[in-house]
Image (cartoon, rainbow, N blue to C red):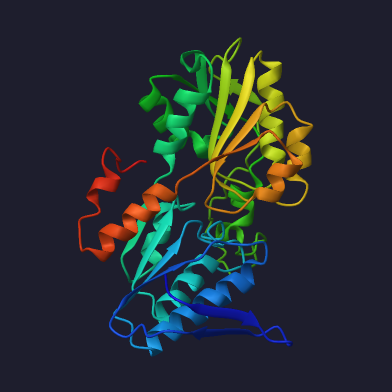
Amino acid sequence: MGKVQVYQEPDRETRVQIQESVRGKDVFIIQTVSKDVNTTIMELLIMVYACKTSCAKSIIGVIPYFPYSKQCKMRKRGSIVSKLLASMMCKAGLTHLITMDLHQKEIQGFFNIPVDNLRASPFLLQYIQEEIPDYRNAVIVAKSPASAKRAQSFAERLRLGIAVIHGEAQDAESDLVDGRHSPPMVRSAAAIHPSLEIPMLIPKEKPPITVVGDVGGRTAVIVDDIIDDVDSFLAAAETLKERGAYKIFVMATHGLLSSDAPRLIEESAIDEVVVTNTIPHEIQKLQCPKIKTVDISMILSEAIRRIHNGESMSYLFRNIGLDD
């Protein structure tokens, strides 16, 4: 382990000092995301650039949770921030990235360097098999149609049934907030030729909340990649309870658990929330005993070992299909 000093000046500027030679060496920078995500990013960029200017042979970033990954689509007049962050990392000198369960796999295309997007699902599947009593009577639940593909992957590997909650408001994925509604909605003679009629899409009308699949008397396991704002999970849990679910578990890779999430989970119908340690959440666990942690450090350490020794990474991606 190399020696480096990272601190903030009185004016809150980040300063990094590499305290031993990295010339000609493979440097692995492990950076987890704290609550102050912008400071975390600056620390990483400055550290990468410091290693680059110190003539490191290669600089590999190990970032279990890639920040700003939820901002990977154009939203009206916004920007694709994860693309900006990827460009900044490459420009700073990063030569390889190891991460886990990107919010969208297409984010890998934002980089012009190799990206290894590892999966936490084997660890979560093992937890289901070993820690959930009578898991054979469980059903895998997608809290929205958008997460149905992930739920299907879990269900097929565990040989379980699947249920999908349909009708829940999906503000983050709605067409109303992306670039397709950025042109003016009013037809003006100056913009459109009088003889040209452009058909308009019929507005979407959200149906009443329904559960596609049988959850009555069974253990419901809701799966997703990120749990941050827990309102959608709480609403899903209430819906499942109304449909007769016996117990409700939530499984996610990244447990951001911001704001009042621990308190809301403790007071909810959810029996247990299981997340990995890609993000530190010790404080949240003290606030809510329902939160459990699955350790994924083993796969990260094996990835580091293989890259350093020039070995193939395919072993870590065995049995992973294009849709996983």
Residue farthest along the top direction in this orientation: 217
Residue farthest along the left direction in this orientation: 311
Q: Judge by depth and name the residue closer to the eye, 304 or 110.
A: 304
Residue at point 49% right, 44% down? 295
> In the image, residue 102 lies at what x, y percent?
46, 53
Q: Judge by depth and name the residue closer to the eye, 1 or 174.
A: 1
Q: Is residue 23 left or right of residue 289?
A: left
Residue at point 48% right, 30% down? 127
> In the image, residue 173 lies at what x, y percent?
58, 48
Q: Is residue 315 left or right of residue 160?
A: left
In the rendered image, which quarter is residue 227 located in?
top right
Q: Which quarter of the figure is the N terminus placed in?
A: bottom left
Residue at point 64% right, 14% down? 246
> In the image, residue 24 lies at what x, y percent?
28, 83
Q: Is residue 63 left or right of residue 24?
A: right
Q: Is residue 258 above or below residue 78?
A: above
- Regarding residue 189, the answer to whether it shows in the image is no
Q: Judge by depth and name the residue closer to the eye, 85 or 93.
A: 93
Mark count: 0
- Regarding residue 34, the answer to whether it shows in the image is yes
Q: Is residue 271 left or right of residue 138?
A: right
In the rendered image, which quarter is residue 310 located in?
bottom left
> In the image, residue 218 lies at what x, y percent?
57, 13
In the rendered image, which quarter is residue 5 located in?
bottom right
Q: Is residue 88 above or below residue 145?
A: below
Q: Is residue 254 above or below residue 250?
A: below
